[in-house]
Amino acid sequence: MRLLGIIGGSGLTQYPGLDITEQKHVETPYGEPSAAIKIGTLNGKKVVFLPRHGDRHSIPPHRINYRANIHALKAIGVTDILAVAAVGGITDKFTPGVLSVPDQIIDYTHSREQSFFSEQFRADNHIDFTWPYDDELRETLLKAAADAGLSALDGATYAAVQGPRLETAAEIRRLARDGCDLVGMTGMPEACLAREAELPYATLAVVANWAAGITNNVLTMDEIQQTLAEGIDDVKTIIANVIKQ
Ligand code: HPA
C-alpha cells in the first residue's frame, strides 16, 4: 500500500478539503520538522500533509529543517512525496499561472544541510542524482493533470536559490544562460534528501510570477500571492486525481 506525503509550499500552508484525523509531533535525530505531520483523508484516501514553511508560514526557505521533514515523513510511513512549489518563470513557456512538472535541478543554495550521512559517511552513500525527480511519480502527475483537462508542462530545469530575497535581474540572466526555466527557493536539498531516504519524489510547480527583470514590472508579493491562489486550485484538482490513480 502506497501512502502519499504532500509537502505544501507558499500558497498551500493549509490544505482545505483535507479531513485531518491526526496530528503527529515527530521527533527526529535531526531536530523538529516544520510542523506537526497532518494525517487525514482526501477524497476517501489516506494522505499525509506537511506545510514546509510551518503552520503559520513563519519559516523562511534557508531555515527549513529539510532533513527533519523528510525523515519524519519516512518515519510515519510515507512511501512517495509530492512537493508543491511556487516558482518564478524564466523562459518563455513558463508564464505566470502555468503548472510545471520539472525534470532537472541546478542547485545554487549554500550552507544548507544536504545529507543524512553528514555525521557518519560511508563510501556507498553517494546517491545517483542524474535524474533528480522520480519518473513514475512525474508521469502520475502529468496523467492526473491531463485527466482533469489541465495542462502541466512536462520537463523544466528548476534553479534552487538561497532566498529569502528575490533575485536580481543579472542573477536571473545567469540562470537563463545556465539553462534554467524556473526559479524557487525550496527545491533543494529537499529533493536529494528524499533520494537519500529512497522515497520517490516529484514536484508540481506553480509559476507565480515572471522572474526578476524578465518584464519591466516590479515584483510585488500581492501579485505573486494572487496568481498562486488561482494556481493552487488546479494543484488541488491534480492531487485529487493522483490519489484516484
Ligand atoms: N524567485 C524565487 N522563488 C520564487 C519566485 C521567484 O521569482 N517566485 C516564487 N518563488
Image: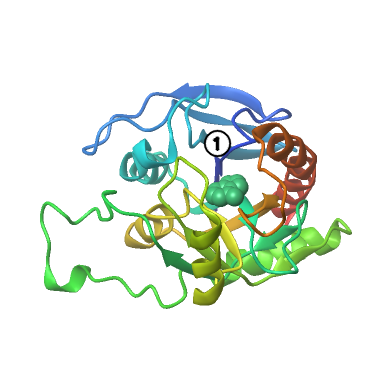
Residue pictured at 38% horizontal, 73% vertical? 129
Residue pictured at 61% horizontal, 38% vertical? 46
Using the rendered image of the protein, determine whether residue 176 is visible from the camera's viewpoint: yes
Q: To which quarter of the image does residue 203 belong?
A: bottom right
105 horizontally vs 215: left or right: left
146 horizontally vs 51: left or right: right
Using the rendered image of the protein, determine whether residue 75 is visible from the camera's viewpoint: no
- List the residue tagged with mark 1: 49
Image location of residue 98, percent across then percent down: 76, 57
Q: Secondary structure at mark 1?
A: strand
Image location of residue 34, percent across then percent down: 41, 31
Image location of residue 25, percent across then percent down: 38, 24
Residue pictured at 62% horizontal, 66% vertical? 138
Say which quadrant the C terminus sits in.
bottom right
Residue pictured at 47% horizontal, 28% vertical? 54
Image location of residue 183, percent across then percent down: 55, 57
Q: To which quarter of the image does residue 141 belong?
A: bottom right
Numbered-mark total: 1
Is 56 or 164 nearer to us in this picture?
164
116 relative to 105, above or below: above
